[in-house]
Image (cartoon, helix red, strand yellow):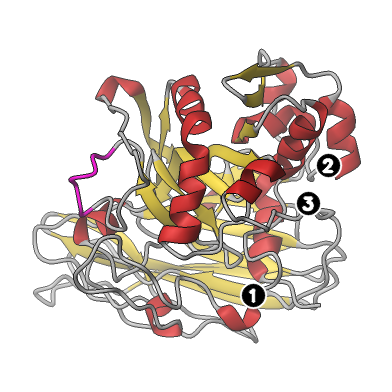
Amino acid sequence: MFEHASRLYARQLFPTRNGYPLYIPEPPSNRPLELIERGTSIGDVGIVKLDGSFQYAFNIFTPQTDAAINYFGVPVGFHNLTLHGRDTTSVPYKFSKKSEVKTEGKYRKTVDVPLNAHASDGSTASPAGFKLGYQVGESPSESALLTLPDGAIGEDYNHLEDIRTYSIENAPSWYTFISETLGRQAPSGSLYVVTGCDKSAAWGIVTNAENSEPKESTLEFTAKFVAASASYACSWGTMGFAGSIPPCRSADPKPGVKQPHNQCHFIRGFKILLRESVSTELNQDQFVAVESITDHSKIDSLLRQNENSFPGSDSWWSRLVSSSQSGGGTPHQEGADDWIDDVELDPPTGPYHALDTINKYLLETNPQAEVAISHESDWWDLSPGATLANEDDIIRRLASRTPTIESGGVFLVARAATQSDTRPNEGSAMVGDHEAAR
């Protein structure tokens, strides 16, 4: 059975506890400039699709009148929350330059070669770009690697309880808006509210299936120069890889415009499940299937790398799928949407998530609740190893946690962090400048 590479990628990077790994980090190119420049952000409501992209619907902190951000419209009865600068925590270099986020696998760096880089005036006085080569060894287990040549920023909302309460109150209308008004597939359990994210301007991804043959890959990063500063944008290359995504050319940023950190690699937030009776009232007959996280078939190794998805550029994704945009009304509906239909499986949402198991368990054990809501951080202590725990182990550990019910919603009480929660995972690593430069 075909398995989309996004599932392997997410399955491998979930245990790093950075959040929900997005296999396709770049925003769609056929959106308003403001929406593209910011990428996926705090307060976004949407769904992680099978291809590993985040399908945006609306933002809970943006007024209805802001048609550039709430481009598709807003749910009936919508009122936005207020976002102040003091409500968020930002880390400019959460991932340092030339960082790597990787799981256990036989990756050996083979190339770190400077490239000739030219500024817009044709000179070569500016810093050069570089190539990163990875030799992927034969391995009985699958693995994944994310490289961030320019590093990545991190941002998180500080008052999770405010978003949780707001989401419990409004989740039914959100599902109705996405499923009926926008006409998208939004099975109960698929809704995701972003409370934090990590974003970059450049990246490269390698995934390797279990029992795969040795292969060698080259990720090529060319320096792009904007005014007096330089940042790395990605070009694309492979050696010895089959089944790779074709390269493309993107428009460079205009003079004086800084390359935005709009490529979102990890999102942190709430997943929301409605009880079946509530979903039936909303004419929803689909639920996210809770599958075994070890039930996956082998796939060939794949390489993906972005192409400087800057506002106005023609990204490789926009050329892969035909996405329609209505011209005059609100909300804007999508035709082909932002995923590939001919490889889509059932269910049409992303890979297995431990929160699906948690939410299902919460509703089954708390019949008085109508909505289950869990945050990304809720599963971390329920799966303490270097790989994702299976469903039975998660449920067994859930028995020791105390749920709380408020306004018809059930959720887990935050547990005080222990030393084991902050200890690095065995079998996973984040490599910064000092190692990446070796």
Q: Which residue lies furthest to the top in this view?
A: 416
Amino acid type of the residue that numbered disc 1 sits on in the rendered structure: Glu
Residue 382 location (% of width, % of height): 78, 30
Q: Name the residue under label 2.
A: 389
- Give the overall secondary structure of the magenta segment: loop
Viewer-proximal residue, 166 or 27?
166
Name the residue at 77% across, 25% down: 366
Judge whether residue 35 is colored magenta. no
Judge whether residue 65 is colored magenta. yes
Q: In which quarter of the image is residue 312?
A: bottom left
Q: Is mark 2 on a helix, strand or loop?
A: loop
Q: Is mark 3 on a helix, strand or loop?
A: loop
Name the residue at 56% across, 57% down: 186
Q: What stretch is highlighted in magenta?
A: 62-68
Amino acid type of the residue that numbered disc 3 sits on in the rendered structure: Val
- Cα–Cα span, label 1 and label 3: 17 Å
Asked whether the beta carbons under mark 3 and mark 2 sit within 8 Å of each other, the answer is no
Residue 217 location (% of width, % of height): 60, 75
**Residue 131 shows in this picture:** yes
Residue 182 location (% of width, % of height): 41, 62
Q: Which residue lies furthest to the front in this view?
A: 281
Q: Earlier in the sequence, mark 3 or mark 2?
A: 3
Task: Work out which quarter of the rendered image holds the N terminus and state it.
Answer: bottom right
Q: Name the residue under label 1.
A: 344
Tag of residue 182? none
Name the residue at 49% across, 29% down: 169
Residue 258 drawn above or below residue 108: above
- Cα–Cα span, label 2 and label 1: 26 Å
Viewer-proximal residue, 322 or 385?
322
User: Which-is-in-front pick, marks 2 and 1?
Assistant: 1
Q: Mark 3 points at which residue?
A: 290
Amino acid type of the residue that numbered disc 2 sits on in the rendered structure: Ala
